[in-house]
Amino acid sequence: MELTSKVFVVTGGGNGMGREVVLGLLQRGAKVAAVDFSEDGLAETKRLAGTASGLSLHRLDVSDRAAVLALPDAVVKEHGAVDGLLNVAGIIQPFVKIAELDFAHIEHVMNVNFWGVVNTVKAFLPLLQQRPSAAVVNVSSMGGFLPVPGQAAYGASKAAVKLFTEALYAETQGTSVAVTVVFPGGVATNITVNSGVEMPKMTGGSGKMPKTTSPEEAGRLIIEGLEKGSYRVLIGSDAKFMDRMARLAPRRATELIAKQMKALLG
């Protein structure tokens, strides 16, 4: 997909991977409607964008369906059209086992991660279907195909995003809308802070922190997947390795992750 002069809506545009996607699209000559819950985060994205033109800021909660359904009109009023939707916004849960995780946290994670994607896709798909070339890119997670102890609700929400996006891909075959699902592994973002969650440090067997992908690299790969119209995008060597292992030896993959996470859960 050609990006120059196209209009893209990016959720989670006020931090982390979403911010890097916004900045990367602007650098490629696209126009961007950056969406985020954090007004301060959006302001920082605008500051980092510098003199780049074509950026609009939209503060809202993607789990607020009424606000999301009103967003297309605001974006069209600002930019004249919408050519693509990139759902990057997401939060994690407190790092505890299912037995200790309360319903409020489960519902909040599902509302943001899954229903936020459903809300935006339902809101923008009618507009995208009218364009000669359009795209939907939804960010799932390595935790969407591999169970991570202590992140059951998060993983369930991202697994739901995976299947929802794959079904959308199947339903849009033969149309102008390209659909991509993204699976990041560990990315060095502030997702714990943005989620209001404290999480213990995770170290590998060597005592060092596991290798993570930078937000800049993750953003670049997401944009590359958008340009190519990729079906799937795997971000990080961890996601690529565990994707293969989860398909070839799912029980072994689950037990490996459980072993790695055991020290964090007590």
Image (cartoon, rainbow, N blue to C red):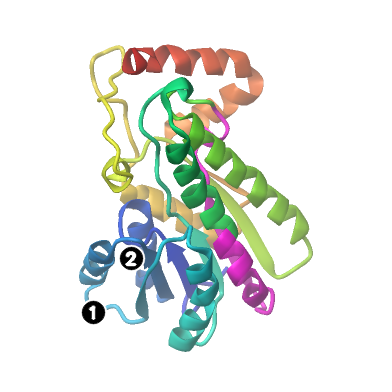
Image spot of residue 45 (x, y percent): 27, 66
Question: In the displayed structure, does residue 149 sit left or right of residue 166?
Answer: left
Foreground: 100 or 25?
A: 100
Q: Is residue 164 left or right of residue 147?
A: right
Q: Which mark is residue 59?
A: none
| Residue 145 lies in the magenta stretch | yes
- 190 in the magenta segment: no
Image point (46%, 18%), residue name: 257
Residue at mark 2: 23
Say which residue label 1 marks: 51
Q: Are the residues tagged 2 and 1 within 8 Å (C-beta)?
A: no
- The segment highlighted magenta reads 119-146
Disc 1 packing (10 Å; few <14; some 14–19; many ≥20): few
Residue drawn 75% across and 53% down?
A: 170
Residue 50 falls in which quadrant of the image? bottom left
The span from disc 2 to disc 1 (Cα, nearest Å) is 11 Å
Answer with left or right where residue 214 lies relative to residue 151: left
The amino acid marked with disc number 2 is Leu
| Image position of 179 with respect to 182: above or below | below
Quarter-of-image position of residue 44: bottom left
Question: On the rendered image, what quadrant is the N terminus found in?
Answer: bottom right
In the displayed structure, would residue 29 be above or below residue 183?
Answer: below
* View extreme (right): residue: 174
Instruction: List x then y, in percent, for residue 253.
Output: 55, 18
Looking at the image, tell me whether mark 2 or mark 1 is earlier in sequence order.
2
Question: Which residue: 58% across, 27% down?
Answer: 244
